[in-house]
Amino acid sequence: RNPEPDELDACRPWIERQVDIIRPEVIVTLGRFALQSLLQRQVPISSVRGEWQQYRDIPLMPTYHPAYLLRNPAAKKEVWNDMKKVMSHLAIPLS
């Protein structure tokens, strides 16, 4: 099920604290709710999927949620392209 707004609000401080502690090089959001929760704005995943965003000065790559891929297997190619961008950003060679 989709998370309720109060559930997202309750989890936000924990996520922010984890990001502060870990300071990841990149964040990959899986699906609309993860994206909108971090960016704090209503943005359709389809309009920004595969395009770099910023979250607290950390590059953020939005992509589709795995449940979406189960319903739409053809979208796996788009997600793979997103992951190749992430790997390139992190200088991870493609095998």
Image: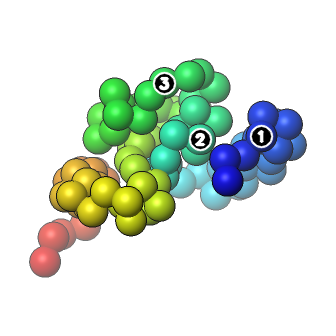
Location of mark 2 (residue): 33
Q: Going from the N terminus, do you reach mark 1 or mark 2 first?
A: 1
Q: Mark 3 belongs to which amino acid?
A: Val
SS for callout 3: loop
Instruction: Using the image, tell me which numbered label, if any, was put on residue 91.
Output: none
Please say whether residue 58 is visible from this viewpoint.
Answer: yes
Q: Residues within 10 Å of mark 3 (few under 14, many from 20)?
A: few
In the displayed structure, does residue 30 sit left or right of residue 37?
A: left
Please say whether residue 84 is visible from this viewpoint.
Answer: no
Tell me how far mark 3 sits from mark 1, CA to CA: 17 Å
Q: Residues within 10 Å of mark 1 (few under 14, many from 20)?
A: few
Quadrant showing the C terminus: bottom left
Instruction: Using the image, tell me which numbered label, if any, was put on residue 43.
Output: 3
Residue 9: image x %, image y %?
Answer: 81, 36
Tell me how far mark 1 sits from mark 2, CA to CA: 10 Å
Q: Mark 1 belongs to which amino acid?
A: Glu
Question: Is the residue 67 above or below the residue 42 in the image?
Answer: below
Q: Going from the N terminus, do you reach mark 3 or mark 2 first?
A: 2
Tell me how far mark 3 sits from mark 2, CA to CA: 10 Å
- Between 87 and 81, the residue placed more toward the observer is 81
- Between 74 and 12, the residue placed more toward the observer is 74
Q: Going from the N terminus, do you reach mark 3 or mark 1 first?
A: 1
Residue 57: image x %, image y %?
Answer: 51, 33
Residue at 82% x, 44% y is: 7
In the displayed structure, does residue 88 sit left or right of residue 11?
A: left
- Between 58 and 64, the residue placed more toward the observer is 64
Residue at 21% x, 58% y is: 74
Location of mark 1 (residue): 4
Mark 1 in CB contact with mark 2 (< 8 angstroms): no
